[in-house]
Amino acid sequence: MPKLIETIDLVTNFYTHEGVVKALDKVSLSVDHGCTFGLVGESGCGKSVTVRSMMRIIQEPGKIDGGQVLFYPENNGSDAVIDLLQQSETVMKGLRGDKISMIFQEPNAALNPIMSIGEQVAESFLFHRKKEMCQQILMDMDTSISKTHPLKFFLKALYRLAAVRPEALILKLFSKTPLLKYWETRLKKEAMRRAVEMIAKLSIPHAEDIAQSYPHNLSGGMKQRIVIAIALACNPLLLIADEATSNLDVTIQAQILDLLKDLKQNVISSILLITHDLGIVAETCDRVGVMYAGNLCEVADVKDLFNKPRHPYTRALLNAVPRFSNEGKLQSIEGNVPNLVNPPSGCRFHPRCRDARAICKESFPITKEIGKNHQVACFLYTERPRSL
Amino acid sequence: MQKIIELKNLKKYYPVLGGVFRRQVDAVKALDGVDLDIYRGECLGLVGESGCGKTTTGKAIVRLHKPTDGKIVYYPSEGNATSGTDITKIPIKSLKRLGIRSKLQMVFQDPTTSLNPRMLIKNIIAEPLKAQHLFSGRELGNRVMELLNLVGLTKDHYLRYPHEFSGGQRQRIAVARAIATNPEFLVLDEPTSALDVSVQAQILNLLHELQLKLNLTYLFVTHHLLVVKYISHRLAVMYLGKIVEIAKTGDIFSRPRHPYTHALLSGIPVPDIEHKQKRIVLSGDVPSPLNPPAGCRFHTRCPFVIDLCRHQDPVLEDTGDGHRVACHRQTEIEKLTHDLFGENKHHGGSGYP
């Protein structure tokens, strides 16, 4: 399948008081069209920073210091490429929530407590689908045979303008002035109608009532569904789910995972799933990337990764996960995750690695293709250090 | 087997105040009649979803709050084994004098919030010893060093502050503090859920070693069934303030009898590619404990609900071999799940013998 999004040598640093936290150290990964990519790793290994860098929503004191994020919106393999790091903020705002959207970990923090659920879902339609909705309203106005509105001519002119240039200055003026705001009601109604439709699509019963309610009225699982509804409102090409289920209970998590699977088949093209739970990866993903301390150590198809893990960290991680089948003591990885202000020299895993050799302390290995779609960055499989 | 803690019809209602005079208008039924025996030297796992009363049970045993009703009987190791003391009847102040406080200790969920950031590690660990007047002076220092070694830390860590440690090390310090007074019984309230996978295994192994070394009894409270499988001998499953099933760990995994246990087990994502099982997805959410459903509390989400479940609350019945289930249809449950979901075998057996 053709690529959808790709990062090349992405470097992100956080300039804190204690020093520079080297959160990402040349991360290169790519997600294909129609693929569910899982990004796993322990907390603080840079999973979230990777996707936040891709979306360009890194907050102060973080800074993207190098690399490229290439976005290929066309599915047919054409060369239409957008380098997201070079785009202006306006373009990025248009992309976020439209072509690429994101689900955050904590639904309580992602939803606005003083806006009704319907308004929050409708917001993304109002932001990204203004043109389309105005055109539809115009068509409705033409076809409807109901009584003519006294301001019909005036309203029509506005909608016509919005359908062509939604960011026109006069429209902004009209939606800021109290009495003239009136023209937007029809637009909002249309957005609300779409929002209710969207909520109903996620198999939430009584969508109408839910749209009227507020976040505190809903349970955790329901809130997460609403967050998913907001993310899917504009049919994104890529859905990024950042620990979307880790705050939920087991039975609710099962519901949400099922929902994501259904959506994957029907609605979304690709999912980039960030999680620390290898179980979720095994069940939902096609491809997996394993991260450790700001490096991507291994990328492989899900079957290869679980059957033939090659990187020592992946192996150790798979052994440390509790399972149904294995007996006896759990294998642990000795030591702790390093502090990224002073990361270990060379390969960042070497202080905890059983197969560490002298070369691991000095330099970082290149990422080597060792099998079909299977890349590993470890000196067990290559002798070549990465050039600086 | 000798009992160490016995819960008899334990209830904890949190009042909901309302009106002008802040009178009690309702009650959150966090625990609604819990019966549980904990035997000396075992590790009992208590699992359930959030809000089902797991932590409330643990806190009631160490008397961090007073239960509304019911008994918590503690059988001390020395003295007559049959004469237990009801902890709920003892005033808080006498608990220390009677030496019960030092025998029942607790490890909390998040080590970042349970350790005082302004205290040195040596003071954190020495605090319970000082409070119980067990050691002083140089002896105290030696005891703290001994505890640090027990949990796998060294004397370099003696004079540091909690923020200098990683999550796993902080949890080790919290464990050291809990075992400082030579307790017999530890409540472990989600001790690994704030930790990473690689560190979680370290803490689980440490806890198991300590249990063997110090003859501890654990109540391991968690929401993650697979974690508790490695360390517990028996498992109790809770739902909305009641225990719905209790059995040996292996039995729970190989022959779960309650539909809720079935759903919990199948809901866990398994890190195995070949392991493809049909998942039982429960519809809906956990009902509010403010007004729990009538009859069996699980009936609103149960796939096998019959009329009886809506009216009558099932009691916890022994089905042989210490396997107790609270379900009206427990005799047919194996066939029912098999018909509905196909073969759903979990590999049984607990990790530690």
Image (spheres, coloured by chain):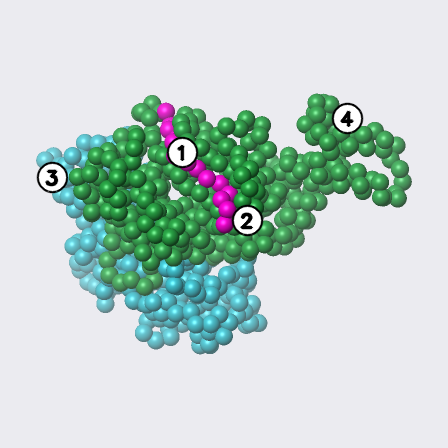
Marks 4/2: CA–CA distance? 40 Å
At 60% from the left and 45% from the top, the residue drawn is: A235
Comes first in the chain, label 4 or label 2: 4
Same chain shared by disc 3 and disc 1: no
> Is A3 in front, or is B299?
A3
Chain cyan in the figure, letter: B
Circle 3 sits on which residue?
Answer: B142
Asked whether disc 4 touches disc 3, contact meaning CB atoms under 8 Å apart, the reply is: no
User: Split into 4 quadrants, where in the image is the C terminus of chain A?
Assistant: top left
- Element marked by disc 4: helix
Instruction: Say if A128 sits above or below B280 in the image.
Output: above
Query: Which span of residues is magenta-colored?
Result: A1-15
Residue A10 got which mark?
1
Marks 4/3: CA–CA distance? 78 Å
Residue B108 visible (yes or no)? no
Residue B294 visible (yes or no)? yes
For residue A206, side relative to residue B120 (left or right): right
Circle 4 sits on which residue?
Answer: A180
Comes first in the chain, label 2 or label 1: 1
Residue A187 got which mark?
none
